[in-house]
Image (tube, rainbow, N blue to C red):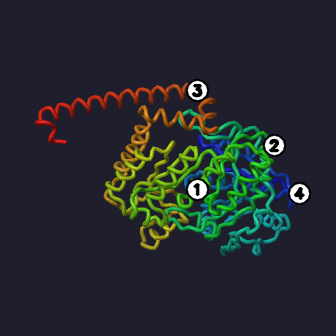
Amino acid sequence: MRVLLSTPPGKTTERWPPLGLLYIAAKLKTKREDEVKIIDAFCENLSKGELVDRVVREQPDVFGMNCSTHIFLDAMDVLNELQKRLPDTKLVLGGYHATFTADKIIRDYPFIDYVIKGEAENSFPQLLDRIENNQAPNDVAGICYRNGSETIDNPFSLITDLDSLPFPDRSMLGKLDYGYTHDGIQLTVGKFTTICTSRGCPFKCRYCSCASFSLRKWRPRSAENVVDELEEIQSQGYESVTVVDDNFTQNRKRVEKICELLRSRKIKLQYYFEGRVEGASYEMLRNMKRAGFNVIYFGVESASQHVLDYYNKTISPEKSMRAIENAKKAGMLVVTSYIFGSPVEKKEDIMRTIEFIRKMKPHAVQINILDCLVGTPIWDELQENGLLTSDAWKTNHRIYEYAGNGLSKEALEDLVDAGYSAYLGAWKNFRGVVDLSKVIVVNKTARKIVLQNIANPATRRKLSEGIRGVRENRASRNDQKTAVGNIEDSSAGGSSR
């Protein structure tokens, strides 16, 4: 059959390859003799109409799309139009949002033929077998579909042996230039791709659906299997790789084995990865840095313990501080994320987090207002308390719509702006320039980012803003010193100090 897989339409400057679709396509090639193609509509910034036209030109027998909550309705618009223009094409939907709302999708959107829940590498080839033989997929794990007026909703199962999966076929992506750009500045290095070395999450953070999607089971690939793929990636001319695992550093011995193999095989890629703050020892991070792991992302979320406890985060502000310090000492670029708006959070808690950002001075920050997403414990609690409308599952929501903490949408947005201002202000001084110079010397990724953006007008603009900020801060400090001197002079020897 002619099989076409696609991401939804959209616009982004964070262009990551559709790894899930590449895995499905690679597995299909080992199981069947279909003609398989991929359209990365999201990273190509295709409109809904442009994507529909592309699919119609391909005339697939089966069209599969993944989607998130944020762009679910856009995906539905595309699939609805495709059903009208390609009435004989079977339409299949998968991904996180589809996994948690499969029965509702089948109920409310009759043009959807099948929803695949969970991991699809095994289920999708089996579904195609049933479609080709005109059989119902009642025995295929994770498939949800309608049988007359009845909805058949099969439970999904996890793939336990990840080493058995073929590597994603990155040649299917064509010439699309992947990477991450912010404000016109390229933040990934050279030819860029992603890798998944483990799946699942054993934790249960209140705001996250990863645990439910993986049934709280963490499944790692072997170190040898991971490095085999990285060796292939290097041979294909890639220079930098983001590890998309939720818990890459979950098993220290596996991480150390990966680092050992990378060095012994002389693989010279540069890696971006996410790690939890607990267990982020200096020794492990230094070992990783020597193997090319140059950029680490920590989910800090808050500097108030009671807020972290509400999130079921199982960390502390002190652990976050040590992790950031260890990563900086190891020579890594450190990115930290924060969430504002928890129902148990007061303005004072957020200000404490902003002060944490200023004090710890991570190299980059991401600040979000708390989302309420389908599949998360927060969503389940809102549902149990009767706070959700019947159609609420179709769109993204923010916590201030349901559970107030005395802070309005506008107040939270102002605090987010204050957080970013504090982050930028922490670097706009002489000490900040010195610290950045040091990390550029010891960190190859930082150095390459600077070099590849040196002639970029956006970089010159940012640099100008930074220099202006240093001057403004210096002038401000001088004004403060003058003011303090005047107070001391007028207070009989400085008794006001």
On residue 456, the disc is 3
What secondary structure is marked by label 4? loop
Q: Quadrant of residue 76?
A: bottom right
**Mark 3 → mark 4, Cα distance in angstroms:** 46 Å
Dot 1 and dot 3 residues touching (CB under 8 Å)? no
**Mark 4 → mark 1, Cα distance in angstroms:** 39 Å
Q: Work out whether residue 88 can be spotted.
A: no
Label 2, residues with CA under 10 Å away: few <14, some 14-19, many ≥20: few
Please state if 223 lies on the left or on the right of 75 as rendered. Answer: right
Residue 48 in percent (x, y) is at 63, 45
Kindly report which numbered mark, 3 or 2, lies closer to the viewer in this rendering: 2
Kindly report which numbered mark, 4 or 2, lies closer to the viewer in this rendering: 2
**Mark 1 → mark 3, Cα distance in angstroms:** 31 Å
**Mark 2 → mark 1, Cα distance in angstroms:** 27 Å
Nearer-the-camera pick, 95 or 302 = 302
Q: Residue at x 78, y 58 (%)?
A: 224
Give the residue at mark 4: 33
Residue 360 in percent (x, y) is at 44, 47
Residue 101 in percent (x, y) is at 59, 66
Task: Tell me the amino acid under the disc marked 1.
Answer: Gly
What secondary structure is marked by label 3? loop
Kindly report which numbered mark, 3 or 4, lies closer to the viewer in this rendering: 3
Task: Tell me the amino acid under the disc marked 3.
Answer: Asn
Give the residue at mark 2: 235
Nearer-the-camera pick, 57 or 191 = 191
Sequence order check: which comes first, mark 4 or mark 2? 4
**Mark 4 → mark 2, Cα distance in angstroms:** 27 Å
What secondary structure is marked by label 1? loop
Dot 4 and dot 2 residues touching (CB under 8 Å)? no
Task: Tell me the amino acid under the disc marked 4.
Answer: Glu
Give the residue at mark 1: 275
